[in-house]
Amino acid sequence: MDIINPATGVVFSTIKSDTKQTLNSKLENLRKGQKSWKKVTINNRLNCIKKFGKLIQENKFVLAQILTSETGKPLQQSLNEILGAQNRIDHLSQYAEKWLEPEVLVDEGATLEHIKYEPLGVIANISAWNFPYNVGYNVFLYALVAGNSVLYKPSEFATLTGKQFETYLHLAGIPEDVFQCVIGDGSLGQHILEAEVDGYFFTGSHKTGSHIYQTVAPKMVPVQLELGGKDPLYVTEDVVDVKQAAINAAEGAFYNNGQSCCAIERIYIAERIYDEFVEAFTEEVKSYKIGDPNDLSTFIGSLTRAQQLGVLKDQVEDAVVKGATLLTGGSTIDGEGYYFEPTVLANCNHDMKVMIDESFGPIIGLQKVSSDEEATTLMLDTEYGLTSAVFSNNEERAIRILDNMNSGTVYWNCCDRVSPKVPWSGRKNSGLGSTLSSQGIRAFVQPKAYHLRMLS
Ligand code: NAD
């Protein structure tokens, strides 16, 4: 498989793909390995994970360069991701034992009722490229700590990073037959769906997620899907500092070139502050440094996938034809690599694709609203349900709106953030199940109820 640097469009490495045969032989080993791994104490499993985290941090500059070279993510953001993902390990280290220990619910007289949490077995983690550390850690670290063995398929756009996970997990003491990486694109993913696996944990698009869900349904094994979003932000007229709100909103929309599942993808602005907000927002976006992702001061690198350039161009054309005002950007950038100008479209409405379809790139639609009710209706007008945000100076007002949102996460005066302490989950086309928090580790175990009676 060719590995392309999206900032240049040049193939800089090749790697051997797995086949159906090598996949099945890895799965066979993982099945054997899991039998021993589940007997290892949680503490010892955690020690391996902690060592893995330490090795990753010690090698973060090299790893960040690898991530940047295959995704076009600006180097500073690659470093941020690697540093930030460590919080999963810290949180697991603190709580995993508590979350996995057996629970005694009844201990009265001769009757005992217990729950034990048993690992699922061999799980498959089919992953995405946009935040491979964050979304990978959310799954494979939690699965390993819970006593499962893991078949990890990185995205074909983050393959080298996936191989590094394998190298460092093995160096940290995770046995080779407990974590295995397989290399390939969707056709290898398809073989995984046909293989014998005890659970599917997927991060990626709604299209692929829905296909996976339907394909593996007859197996009756757990399936968890972390999918896309079309996340709204509503800025009320009472924000204290309109300019600061615009700067924060722009970062939430354009960080990682807008290629975040929880990126702000559409913004509704109260009419009283609309002009001021739009001006400040556009000024901020125009100030972003675009260019070589290896330069630590670059904020906008190249897109990861060439095909997305066409999607973005189409969304801009569609919006402009339907009456949107293009305030900045709107085109691909001539020269090497897959670059698209950071794009701001004002006067948008829900007839436009940019307000309905996931953009997953550096483009945003802005729409004026005249009331909280109108904003709420528009925010809810989506097939997705990942996150929703309100910027307002009034907590009660913001929470009232957020309580009505049908999304797994809601934000007040913040956006585009994930914490290991609370669950990460999508509703509707944004997915199924939760990662992170106690719920995220319980996803990798199955409860067994013990009814015990002492006979006198
Ligand atoms: P994708 O669906 O194209 O690919 C994801 C993975 O699925 C890749 O590893 C790919 O090789 C594999 N795949 C493709 N076809 C397959 C098949 N037929 N069978 C099995 N596997 C197959 O998604 P992507 O472009 O890698 O990721 C971007 C999407 O992921 C966006 O929609 C984004 O919002 C979403 N995402 C969601 C979260 C979240 O936590 N909710 C996090 C990150 C990304």
Image (spheres, helix red, strand yellow):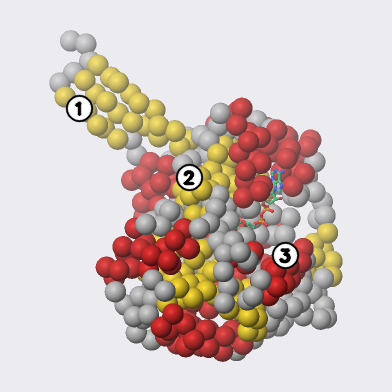
Task: Of the two numbered discs 3 and 2 on the same chain, state the one appearing first in sequence.
Answer: 3
Q: Quadrant of residue 175?
A: top right
Q: Which mark is residue 107?
A: 1
Alpha carbons under labels 2 and 1: distance apart: 32 Å
Circle 3 is placed at which residue position?
311
At label 1, which amino acid type do we have? Asp
The local secondary structure at tag 1 comes to strand
Taking the spot 49% from the left edge, 66% from the top edge, the residue there is 232
Closer to the camera in the image, 346 or 52: 346
Q: Which mark is residue 199?
A: none
Q: Horizontal and vertical percent for residue 100?
A: 38, 41
Q: Residues within 10 Å of mark 1 (few under 14, many from 20)?
A: few
At label 2, which amino acid type do we have? Gly
Q: Quadrant of residue 13?
A: bottom right
Closer to the camera in the image, 442 or 452: 442
Alpha carbons under labels 3 and 2: distance apart: 29 Å
Taking the spot 54% from the left edge, 43% from the top edge, the residue there is 224
Q: Is mark 2 within 8 Å of ligand 1?
A: no
Q: Horizontal and vertical percent for residue 137?
A: 54, 55
Taking the spot 80% from the left edge, 49% from the top edge, the residue there is 17
Task: Of the two numbered discs 2 and 1 on the same chain, state the one appearing first in sequence.
Answer: 1
Q: Residues within 10 Å of mark 2 (few under 14, many from 20)?
A: some
Name the residue at the left extreme: 109
Q: Is mark 1 within 8 Å of ligand 1?
A: no
Mark 3, mark 2: which one is toward the viewer? 3
Using residue 144 as the reference point, say whether residue 412 is left or right of it. Answer: left
Q: Horizontal and vertical percent for residue 286?
A: 61, 87
Check the picture and name the quadrant holding the N terminus: bottom right
Mark 3, mark 1: which one is toward the viewer? 3
Alpha carbons under labels 3 and 1: distance apart: 60 Å
Closer to the camera in the image, 261 or 318: 318
The local secondary structure at tag 3 comes to helix
